[in-house]
Image: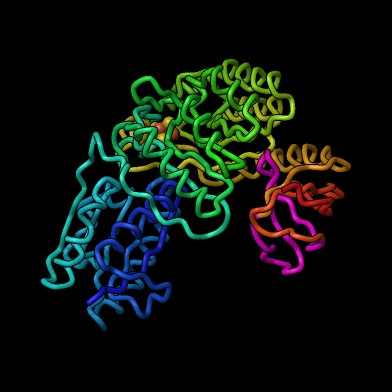
Amino acid sequence: MSHVVYLETFGCQMNEYDSDIVRTILKQNDFVFTDQIESAQVVLMNTCAIRETAHERIHGRLGRLKHMKRERGLVVGLLGCMAQNLKEDLLTKNSVIDVLVGPDGYRKLPDLLLKAIEARAPGVEVTLSEYETYADIVPEQTEGVTAWVSVMRGCDNFCTFCVVPYTRGRERSQDPDSILFEVETLAASGIKQVTLLGQNVNSYKVNGTDFADLIVRVADVPGIERVRFTSPHPKDFPEKLIEAVAEHPAICKHIHLPLQSGSDRLLDLMNRTYTQREFIDLANQMKTRYPSLTLTTDVIVGFCSESDDDFEDTVHTMEEVEFNAAFTFMYSERKNTIAARRHADDVPHPVKVSRVTRLVELQNRISYQHNLAYIGQSLEVLVQSEARKNPDQWIGRTDGNTMTVFPKTGEGVCPGKTVTVAILDATSHTLIGNVLAPDI
Ligand code: SF4
């Protein structure tokens, strides 16, 4: 008899991708999936350890599962980074969790779940592997016209705020032929855009193949019209990759380059191994090579001991680089990181809130100026889906990854088509236009 599983995913895109791996492994072992938690026999939560808010949400969910477990003997599995980071701390006497599996242990999940279902035996698999890349598993990605493809796992950079090296282990690159096979399989199923995923894609290396070689091979796959990647590290961004982005028509002219801080003192405390000047020079080099490049970033405010002057350095960096978009976060201490062991999380919460608010306002102004400049231009947009808020509109993304909405006019326009859209209006996050013609 098949066991029915409900799987919920928290956190980053790598976790979404891992959930697809988990789904594929479990389906190969006769488990079936439901999107109704009430009809599930097994509830799995693929968790995130990056921020405190994610932890709080997961603890809230676990609390709510208690009565379901009492009433109908539900089996509860906690997967992913939080499972790996907190390990046995989570298996207290009254814990609702039966099975705890870290990101490198998903091949053992079917067995552990069967033992929990049939013998009520708890199971733990939190060994970090130096080799596991799930290279032979092509995860099912059935929604939409875009897909994610993991090219490497783990990270060796040890940024002091980051838990990833502890939850996802050492860097491992996946064999390029298995990546190409996965991309070809996706193209055959109608996927038009792939985003190559890794914690630091610049470190990708298998024999003689580096990331620039890999992305060009992926961009050459027939049927794949757009290739993106995330995330590179500014400390070792190769010129060869800037060239590949600029030259290959299928590689999107969009680079996500995480800044984290504009203060040299904090960059050093964070172990980012570049300075503000080096970051700005790299951004300028990219923009000189491709003037209409879209540049986006991540910034942390309120990292340990961040002073007003440190924060102003971040503000000035953002003003100088003029990113198209930025994801700004308040620092929250993660257990087992270098920062948690060595530095106090001493910036008061209200200061963090006011700094993040200021950066969001600054970035919204800059993004709006970038988007206003598109008014009057015609841009290529990959149609992704019907707009959620208005069924009479399509939603898609430009090559630079800016969200674009336009009315459902024009013959043959549908998800998966690339169309030319005349841009008529803009907000800080969205372009609004009219379709001129389907291009293909
Ligand atoms: S590069 Fe730094 S921030 Fe990114 S995953 Fe590695 S340790 Fe974490």
What sort of colour scheme is used for the picture?
rainbow
Q: Residue 38: which quarter of the image? A: bottom left
- 151 vs 240, left or right, is left
Query: Is residue 218 depicted above or below 69 in this figure?
Result: above
Query: Is residue 439 depicted above or below 307 in this figure?
Result: below
Rendered-image quarter of ligand 1: top left
Span colored in magenta? 384-409
Give percent across and percent down for residue 179. 41, 39
Query: Is residue 313 depicted above or below 394 in this figure?
Result: above
Identity of the residue drawn at 86% across and 43% down: 375
Give percent across and percent down for residue 10. 43, 56
Give percent across and percent down for residue 30. 26, 68
Could you tell me how many numbered marks the image carries? 0
- 269 vs 71, left or right, is right
In the rendered image, which quarter contains the N terminus?
Answer: bottom left
Q: Please check the rendered image and state whether residue 370 is part of the magenta-colored stretch, yes or no.
A: no
Identity of the residue drawn at 49% across and 27% down: 233
Q: Please check the rendered image and state whether residue 392 is part of the magenta-colored stretch, yes or no.
A: yes
Give percent across and percent down for residue 76. 27, 67
Identity of the residue drawn at 35% across and 60% down: 23
Q: Is residue 29 visible?
A: yes
Q: Is residue 429 visible?
A: no
Q: Residue furthest bottom?
A: 71
Q: Residue 325: which quarter of the image? A: top right
